[in-house]
Amino acid sequence: MLNVPSQSFPAVGSQQRVAPAGQSRNKVALKPGHSLMDWIRLTKSGRDMTGLRGRLIEVTEEELRKHNTKNDCWTSIRGMVYNITAYMDFHPGGEEELMRAAGIDGTDLFDQVHRWVNYESMLKECLVGRMATKVTVVTKGLAPPSLPPPASLGPAAGPPPPKDTRPRYDWFQTDATVNIVVYTKRKLPAVGSAVVDLHNGALRIEVVLGKLSYLLHWCLPHEVEERVGVHTASAVGKIQVVVWKKAKSKWTELGEHLDAHNTFERRRDRGVFYRQCVLVSKTEVTHDTRLLTLRLAPSTHMHVPVGTHVYLKGTLADSEVVKPYTPVDSALLPEAPPTEGSEASHLFLMVKIYPDGALTPHLDTLNIGEAVCVSSPEGPFSLRLLRGVTHLYLLAAGTGFTPMARLIRHALTDLPTLRKSKLMFFNRKEGDILWLTQLDQLAVKENRFEVEYVLSEPSDSWTGQRGRIQASMLTDFLVRPEDSKCLVCVCGPTAFTELAVRLIKELNFSDEEIHAFQG
C-alpha cells in the first residue's frame, strides 16, 4: 500500500517568490468558468481525474515519460505523480508553462516560480501514485580509496578550517522561569529575529538569519504557563527566550527533542509553520479594502521583517486555500515607535476584497474574535539592499503598495544616508488610493518624501497624472543625482511589474538597482 502524504500545504520550503528584476511570473487570462473555485468544484464532482478509477500505482521513469502530451500529461513533484491533464485550462500560468514539466520530474520547474502554491491540496484528486524507487547496486571492490585523516596531511596541507558560524544554545532556570539563550554569532536587527511558539507543552524557537534558519524544538517535561518572553541583545547577537513554570520545581532537562530540533539550514527548505491569530478589528481603508488587525496569542512571539510576507490559510469547500499578504503598520507613520514586544504581538494586513476571490470573501465575513491561521514570515527581501541608498524610488499599483508602506517608514526613520524617497502610485480611480490622506500628510510633513498619483480612470475633476505607466512618466521621476546610490522597488500585478522593470532598465538602471516584488 502506498504511503500517501497528508494534504497539507504550502509545500515544504514554501515561500512567496520574489524574482530578480525582469524574471517575473507569466499569467494568462483564464476562460470563464476556470477560476480556482471552479477547479475546486470540479475536483469535488466525482469525476475521475486520473483515469485509474481511484487506484494508486507506482510509476517508473519510463512510464512517466510516456505521458507527455496536452491530452495525456503526467508530472512528478517531490516523488508524487499527478495527472495534470484536466488542470491545463485552469492554470494561471497557461498550458505552455505546465507542458514544460510534462512526462518528467517537474519539482525544480515548480520551485523556480511558485513553490508556495498549494499543489498537494489542489491536485489531490489528480494523484496517480508514487515514483518507483531506484535501486542502486554497489559492486564490491570498486569503492574509491579512503583518504587519510586530515592530521596525517601535515600542517601545510591546506587552509585553516573555516570559522564556526553555526548558532548554539544554552539554558538556565530560576524558581519561576526556564530561560533558553541562543548565541547567533552575528549582529541582529534591533526588533529581533526570533519566532517563538508555545502550544500544548511544545516549544518551538526559530531564529531567522538572512536566508538561513536555526530551529530549536522541544516537548517540555513539565507544565508551563501559556506565555513567552523574548529579549534580544542585537549588538552581541544573543536572544533569550523566557518560559514561566507552573510549579516551582527543578528541571533536569528541557524535554524530548521534536522534529528538526537543533538544525541550521536554508529557510526555503523548511516546512511552513502556522499558528492561530485572533481578529481584533476590521476597518475600512477604501470601498473594497480592509485593514485587518490580528492579535497573536501570548504564547507566540513573531516579528515580520520589512519586505516579507505571511500566508493566511482557510478551508473552503473542504479544500485548504492559502494566499500571501504583506503586513503594514497600523498607520503609515505610527505615532509611537515600534518595540520588539508591540510588533511581535499584532499583525496589520491590508486586504482587497474580491467578490469572486478564493479567500478574501471569507476574510471579509470573519467576525471579531474569530481565528485565522497565519504562517511565519516568508520571502527573501533583505534590508541590506538599502545600505548606503540615498535615493529610494517606489513604483506601486493597487495593493502593490503594501510592501512599500513599511519601506517608506524604515527609510525615513532608520536609513541615515537617505536624501529622497519618492512614490509613484498607480490606481484606477481616486477612491482606490490606499491611505491617500496619510500619504499627502507625510509629503507635507517630511521634505525627503514625495508622492505622485496616476489614475487610469480619473474623474473630470482630477488634476493629477492620467493613464498607465509609460517611459515619459519615469524620465523625470527617476532622477540620478551626482554622488547618489539609487534603489527602485516595484510591486503590482504581473503585467505592470514586467513593463515597469523594462522601462526602468531603458533608463540605464542596473539589475542591482531594481527590486521587483512578485505575487
Image (spheres, helix red, strand yellow):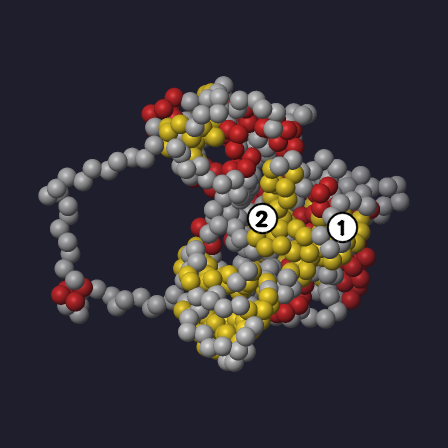
Q: Residue at the right extreme?
A: 461
Q: Residue at the top extreme?
A: 71
The quadrant where residue 377 appears: bottom right
Total number of numbered discs in the rendering: 2
Q: Residue type at mark 2: give it.
A: Ala
Residue situated in front as seen by the camera: 422 or 55: 55
Cα–Cα gap, marks 2 and 1: 35 Å
Q: Position of residue 453 (x, y in %)?
A: 76, 49
Residue of label 1 = 367
Mark in the foreground, 2 or 1: 1
For the point 84% across and 47% down, the residue is 463
Q: Position of residue 360 (x, y in %)?
A: 70, 43
Identify the mark at residue 351; answer none if there is no mark. none
Residue situated in front as seen by the camera: 175 or 293: 175
Relative to 342, does residue 10 appear above or below in the rendering?
above
Relative to 270, does residue 485 appear above or below in the rendering?
below
SS under mark 1: loop
Residue of label 2 = 516
For the point 67% across and 25% down, the residue is 33
For the point 42% across and 22% down, the residue is 67
- Image quadrant where one finds the N terminus: top left
Asked if labels 1 and 2 touch by Cβ distance under 8 angstroms, the answer is: no
- Image quadrant where one finds the C terminus: top right
Residue situated in front as seen by the camera: 32 or 440: 32
Label 1 crowd bin: few (<14), some (14–19), many (20+), radius 10 Å: few
SS under mark 2: strand
Q: Is residue 507 at least partly visible in the picture? A: no
